[in-house]
Structure formats: structure tokens, C-alpha cells
Image (cartoon, coloured by chain):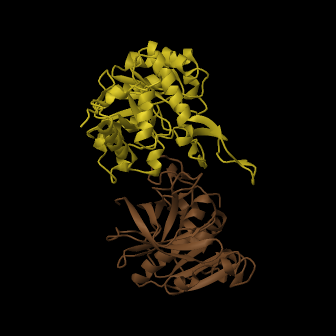
Chain colours: A brown, B yellow
Amino acid sequence: MKKYIDDFVVVENRRLNHEYVILTLQLDRELPEILPGQFAEVKVENGPDTFLRRPISIHDADYDKMQIKLMVQEIGEGTRIMGGLQKGDSLNLVYPLGSSFSEPDTDDVLLVGGGCGVAPLLYLGRRLKQKGITPKFLLGAGNRNGLVAIEEYEKVGEVNVTTEDGSAGTKGYVIHHPLMKTDKPAYGHVYTCGPEPMMKVVARFAQKHNIKCEVSLENKMACGIGACLCCVTDTQDGRVCTCTDGPVFDSTYLKWQI
Amino acid sequence: MADLTIDLRNGLKLKNPVMTASGTFGYGEEYEDFFDISQLGGIIVKGTTGSRREGNPYPRMTETPKGMLNAVGLQNKGVDHFVKEIYPRIKDYATNILVNVSGSTVDEYEDVARKINELENIPGIELNISCPNVKEGGMAFGTSCPSAVAVINAVRKVYDKHIMVKLSPNVTNVAEIAHAVEGEGADSVSLINTLLGMAIDAETRKPLLSTITGGLSGPAVKPVALRMVWQVSQVVKIPVVGLGGIMNADDAIEFMLAGASAIQIGTANFIDPLVSVKVIKGIEDYCERHDVKAVRELTGAMITE
């Protein structure tokens, strides 16, 4: 897929809680094709110590409005600068990058997200819905305040939640939800993005039940386009770049100890 | 318009002084979506070794103030793969493609160089005796005169096109090494490779690289690089190619004023894939503004009195 470098304009910065925002970015022409699971390398301006771009997954894309959305969790200087962007600010993106979630062979799919890993699942869910598939979401967070933009997911599919403190949904991690405690899972394809320990238990569950499982990795990256070889992960074919061979991988392709 | 061409001699003629540094520009193909890479003076492709290498385990990169540390460790599929799979794809680019050659032993350098010598459209190699991220070879060859001499001497016998030798900054006296390398028949030297550094996470008490130490690059290293280019250019007659933290045309001009005949852009490619063409345009504008007829006039033109 052809990669682009473009200046977008921030048309909305919606704050979700003390650490999450959703940036709506406007392009002045038609968007190129963006697949669910792909990401952008975002240039952070004016950080006294920041240097590299920040890889951020595409949260949503609207071809009619020529807009994309990025969900940003403020975890360091670069993301804090992004979280502070105002309407009218410009943001330079290299995009769309990386592999995408594949199309399922079944109508019964489960999308499991934790923390900021819920971000790419909205766009995936929207694309599945356009194909006539109603996705089931299973979204986890520490507490109810950490479950962000749930109403957007509810517009697209069936939403199930877990919180570690039990303040919303099932108490515990996603793996403690009835959807994953069953011996007969009612879905044939699992997509997951979030903290690695969470993705590993999801992958283990899927493999045990012979369900196809795709995971989206969040390795540290420099270039995002396969030039620097910094973001590698171990696979059946040796070390490969997460930015070009991934970020989405079939869980069985990775050399995960699960 | 100023004459931007640079002749690095022994068959290496550049349409302009801007090349991209090894390990930061892939095989050129990764950047083709963004601009016409034939505009470049040259592309130095990934470090290539005798056999396939997986490199170091993840994590192998961390951001540091105005720079980054990496410990990739020469991941590549080996010279035979380059010759069979990659060379046919890139051989017709209308720019100079140089192969960065590395190894653990003198024999390995020699073996890779011999195979690259057969490739008609590769006008030169960059001998990497300065990689800080491998246990054997690499920098070990570039930090003492006798070992540097041994590599250049062996490769010179099997490689007749342009040999650029990439020098390590992790030495007491870089000029001494450069001088020794020149004596063995190197056609040019490029410097600097990355500066050995490290980073720790205070919260977890863990190193941020799997190898603990890695190579620092980016604007943070520019003053060191500039100083070394100046020192080396004082003692060698062969062309000096400057690199280390070049982010824009002004940086590039500064390296030329310090004594570089050409420059390489490395880490900046990660932040702005278009940076190299912007630097070419900026050099052109500079020449216009300062009434410079040929860019080569800038080499060593720093005014000290």
C-alpha cells in the first residue's frame, strides 16, 4: 500500500478522562484507503526532549468527511503534547502504515481490547459492521473511568466490559468475563489489542479452542516504515519488523511463550 | 544554479553532496512512496555481512533527548541474499548505491567485498569498522590502527572500486585511525558512526536496551561529529564524508565547512522521510545566497581569523 506524508488539521480534541483524548483530524482532500489495524507515525512538534515520531493506531476513519481519529493515551512527553493540541493546530502524519486485521471467515467475531488497545478495534468493528457482521466487543480497564468512548463502540456492536475493581461490568480482567470462561466459545475469530499479558491470555484461550486469533503489537518504533529495524519481534521466520510485517500478527506466527 | 556535483574519486561521482546513511534508509525502496530517490547523491544500504544475522533481541531502541540509542546489531539476510534478491530490484536506481560491508573477521569482510565487487551497478562500498552493537568485529576493528589496517589491506586486494571507510568516534584519536586507513588505500572516510551510550529506567531499574549499551545518534551528537570531521580533514588527503545529527541544510553546510566533501543523513530520515531532498534544496539556496558557484568550494571553507 502506498504511504503518504500529510499535514492534517485538528478539528476536535475531545478529552475522555485525565489521560485519554480523541483527536479528530481533517485532511484537505480525499483520504487514501486505510485498513483497520493500521497506524500513523505522528510528528510531535516543540517538545524540549522529544525527537522521534509517535506510532498511533487509527481509531476511526470517515471518508465522506475526509477525517481520521486518533485515540491518544498521555503516557509521556510526546503523547502529552498531542493531548494538549487545540482546534486549528496542524499535525504531520506518515500513514497508513503496517499490516491490518484480516477479514473473518465467520460472522461470529470477538474483539478484545484493554487500555489504549481498544483504539483500533472501533474502526475494525465499523468495517465489519459494513460487511454485515455485528461484532462482539470485550473491553477491559482498571476502573469505570478507564472505559473510554464506550458509546462509540455500542453504535457498532455488542459491548461487554470488565474492570479490575468491579466498578463496571464483570470484575477482573477480560479473561474473567463469561465470554472467555466458556468451554464452547460462540465465535470463530478473535482480534485483540492491549497490554501484552492480556493478549497472551487471549491468544492462549483462542489456541486452546482452535480459534483464529490476531494480535496487534505495540513495540517501540523509530521509522515506522521498515528502515531502522528497531521494532522487531520474534516469529517463525526469525526477527521481523512490527511496523511492516505487523503490527497485526496471527498469534501462532509469534514465538510467544503462552 | 550552483554546480552541486562532487567527485569522491575512484569512480564515485555524486550529483550532489547528499547521501543517506546506512541503516537509516533501508534499501531505498522504503522511501520511494515519498519522493524520487534518484535525486539523491547516493544511498548507502544496510550493513551486509557474510551470512544472515538476526541482530540483537528487542528492545533495541530508545529515544533520548534530541537523539536515539540503537542496538540493532547488523540484522541482515547476508551478502548472498543481497546479491540474488535485493540487487536486481535496486540496481537501476539513477543514483549511487553503496553497500555497507561488515563482518566478525577479516575473512568475512573480504568475502563480502569480493561478492559485491562483481555487481556492476554498485560503484563502491562503505567498510563498517565501527558498529558498536556486535560482540565480535565491527567497532573492534575500527578502534585500533593495526586492526583497521588489516581489514582495509585485505579488502583492498579484492575490491577495486571505491572504498569508503566508516570510522568510529569511540576512540582517543580519530585522526590517527583515519591516517592509517588512508595509508592502506581507502578512497574516502565517512564519520561518525554512533557514539557508545546507554539508558536506564529509574523506576524499573532496568536498562532500556537488551544489550545495555547502544549507539547514540541524532542532533545530540552533532557537535562531536563536527569536531571529528574537522580533525580528520586536517590530516588526510582523501575526501571526508561527514555525518552525525544532520537535520537540515545548515547542518550539512556546517559539516562541509568543517572539511567534508559530502554528507550523509541518517536518523533524520526517521522523523522526516523527505529530509534529504529538503537538504539538497537548502544547499542549493545557500549557494545562491552566498554566491557560491560550485558546492565543492565549501569544503573546508570555515573562516577562522
- Name which residue lies at 26% across and 39% down: B94
Residue located farthest toward the top when viewing the structure as drawn: B183
**B97 to the left or right of B265:** left
Instruction: Assign the N terminus of chain B to one quadrant of the image.
Output: top left
- Residue B255 visible (yes or no): yes
Residue A244 vertical placement versus A149 (above, below): above
Residue located farthest toward the left when viewing the structure as drawn: B1
Foreground of the two, B250 or B126: B250
- Name which residue lies at 59% across and 70% down: A116
**Exactly how many numbered labels are in the figure?**
0
- The image quadrant of residue B39 is top left
Residue A245 vertical placement versus B2 (above, below): below
Q: Position of residue B72 (x, y in %)?
A: 55, 42
- Name which residue lies at 32% across and 71% down: A30
**A158 to the left or right of B276:** right
- The image quadrant of residue A110 is bottom right
- Residue B21 visible (yes or no): no
Q: Position of residue A78 (x, y in %)?
A: 58, 59
Foreground of the two, A114 or A11: A11
